[in-house]
Image (cartoon, rainbow, N blue to C red):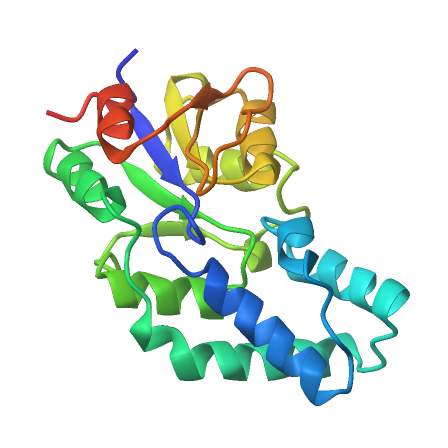
Amino acid sequence: MTPKAVYWDMDGTLIDSEPLHEQAMAAVLTSLGITPPADLHDSIIGISAMPIYEMLRDTLGLRLSFDDWIVRKYVYYMEHVSRLTPRAGAVETFRDLRAQGVPQAVVSNSDRLIVEANMRVIGIDKPGMKSVTRNDVRLGKPDPEPYLRAAWLTGIDPAKSFVVEDTITGSLAGLAAGMRTLFWPQQPMEPPAGAILVTSAEDLKRHLGVN
């Protein structure tokens, strides 16, 4: 099946930003005298900010308000964002699809501040580029709302659209939206039922019909 539209997750899919998210969170927690558990990042990858905050508050004793916590985290992130690089093969595939005239959008559980900074760093912040952030929807991934909003923005039938994701959380959102979902994890893992496992950039291009 040739995609009529392709919707990309951002963090970990288009850009190698997950380590910076982890560092930002660890820096804020450490500054508050809280030792981050070794598996903290793996347990929250792909989840939006509010549920993460609630978990930190309830399990680690975080006492900051949500607004204070997120500002500290984002200040750290924005101070270091310029050093980030695209995930190998991702932006090349994105540009190939653009050259073929395939509508695309970024769909992320991150806030718009972070998404737009990431888009600038990897050079895809072009006029007319569509994006859906956590600020644009009532429910984030794994709810299908972010991907269904992308389909509405592009005017493409969800059933004819492809999703590219690196997390279980995001893949479940794509599947729930009725889209063909390509699961391209950073580390080897089994895809959720119904998703298509992608093992390399070359494999990704093949599934997306990139010439």
Q: Residue at x 81, y 60 (%)?
A: 55
- Quarter of the N terminus within the rendering: top left
- For residue 63, what is the image quadrant? bottom right
Query: Quick one: 89 or 10, which is closer to the camera?
Result: 89
Q: What x and y, as percent, mark residue 209?
A: 20, 21
Q: What x and y, as percent, mark residue 64?
A: 80, 82
Query: Quick one: 139 or 174, which is closer to the camera?
Result: 174
- For residue 84, what is the image quadrant? bottom left
In the rendered image, the vertical position of residue 163 relative to residue 116, given as above or below: above
- Quarter of the C terminus within the rendering: top left
Q: Residue at x 30, y 32 (%)?
A: 200
In the rendered image, the vertical position of residue 22 relative to residue 137, given as above or below: below
Q: Is residue 107 left or right of residue 101?
A: right
- Number of numbered markers: 0
- For residue 81, what is the image quadrant? bottom left
Q: Is residue 35 left or right of residue 107?
A: right
Q: Is residue 161 left or right of residue 167?
A: left
In the rendered image, the vertical position of residue 198 relative to residue 23, given as above or below: above
Q: Residue furthest front?
A: 38
Q: What x and y, as percent, mark residue 71?
A: 61, 81
Q: Residue at x 25, y 47 (%)?
A: 88
Q: What x and y, as percent, mark residue 190?
A: 55, 25
In the rendered image, the vertical position of residue 141 relative to residue 71, given as above or below: above
Q: Residue at x 52, y 84 (%)?
A: 75
